[in-house]
Amino acid sequence: MKRASGQTVVILEEALDLLADQVSGVSLISDIALAAKVISREVNRAGLSEILGEIGRENSHGEQVQKLDVFADEVIQRALYRSGLIACMASEENETFWSVPDDFSRGEYVVAYDPLDGSSNIDVNVSIGTIFSIHSMISSSESGELKDFLQAGKKQIAAGYVLYGSSTMLVYTAGKGVHGFTLDPSVGEFVLSHQDMSFPDPPRHVYSINEANYNTWKTGQQLLIDHLKDGGGFSSRYIGSFVADFHRTLLQGGLFMYPEGKDAPNGKLRLLYECSPIAMLAEQAGGRSSTGYGDVLEIVPDSLHQRVPLYVGNSELVDLAEDFLRDRD
Ligand code: AHM
Ligand code: MG
């Protein structure tokens, strides 16, 4: 595709077509992109369409109103069912995984996703996001098994997120760099806007954490933040929306943290569909992620909704966090 100016425009489908020979299953990203367009439209008109708030309310037409995150979950399900590439799916919205229904054809991949992360931000018009993680099946079951999801993050074939912000962006990796596409609403296409994304080096010195939890943290974590405040020349940014906080960290550099605490022994964020996909993106962008004690991508999950503490961003800052946590608790 070319703009009127003659400048070549790369749309997402073209980029994925080029990758298809090298990474099988990558076209699933285009199904997620289709869902993202529908979700983006709904997010943008949420204040007008009576879709904010709790489930169980009727709209002025007497129809049941869905919360946006439930709506997003169903839109992604429908888009992925039609792909014919996956056997089963798991989402933050559902306690157990489920198989693609019998009336659709099934394939050899499994997708875990958070349909609309940052739900506390939905009703106040702050950026939210979708996060996804794709693995190849390891079971021989046609409809998939739990063990297909319980694979280490380093085995992901692709991962990414969609950020519903001042513009809608899809950022993905299929193990060959990180690429960002911005939705051009005038043509309804995701257009390549950020090729080969990497953490800036040197990074902007920004840390991102919910500091209200300070008194619940272990000593090492408290000392780390004291150090960053006292002598590190750091500034602080925290949106409270993981995709938005990570996206800023990726573009500007820095360190995002959701540590363990007295009230949250494993932190808050979920391994399968929050931490692992972001960890793959971080590694592909030249950074790294850690639980504070080891690489997130190495963890073999023990359950679908497992939580882990998370440190992600520029490698040297994640290393620094590990140094503070080691031997201090
Ligand atoms: P959610 O999946 O219920 O939306 O919770 C995850 C969100 C993340 O987007 C964000 O990083 C974190 O919760 C913020 O938590 P807190 O409000 O404890 O700082
Ligand atoms: Mg979430």
Image: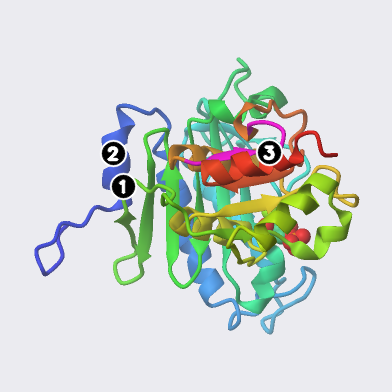
Q: Where is residue 42 in the image (x, y as percent from the top left)?
A: 54, 70
For label 1, the residue is 13
Q: Residue 178 carries which label?
A: none
How many numbered circles does the render carry? Answer: 3
Above-or-below relation of 167 to 231:
below
Indicate the amino acid at tag 3. Glu
Count residues near mark 3 (Cα–Cα under 10 Å), then give few for <14, some for 14-19, many for 20+. many
Tell me the quadrant of the picture where the N terminus can be found. bottom left
Of callouts 1 and 3, which one flags the residue occurring earlier in the amino acid sequence?
1
Q: Where is residue 50 in the image (x, y as percent from the top left)?
A: 65, 79
Question: What secondary structure is marked by label 1?
Answer: helix
The CA distance from mark 1 to mark 2 is 6 Å
Indicate the amino acid at tag 1. Glu
For label 2, the residue is 17
Image point 77% across, 68% down: which residue? 55
Tell me the quadrant of the picture where the C terminus can be found. top right
* Label 2–label 3 contact, CB within 8 A: no
Q: Where is residue 86 in the image (x, y as percent from the top left)?
A: 53, 33
Q: Which of 160 and 92 is in front in this view?
A: 160
Indicate the amino acid at tag 2. Asp
Image point 54% across, 39% down: which residue? 288
Q: Which mark is residue 322?
A: 3
Characterize the magenta stretch by its predominant secondary structure: loop
* Label 1–label 3 contact, CB within 8 A: no
Q: Which of 224 and 146 is in front in this view?
A: 224
Which of the two marks, 2 or 3, is nearer to us in this view? Answer: 3
Which contiguous range is marked in magenta?
287-295
* Label 1–label 2 contact, CB within 8 A: yes
Q: Is residue 93 magenta?
A: no
Instruction: Respond yes or no on whether mark 1 lies under 8 Å from ligand 2.
Output: no
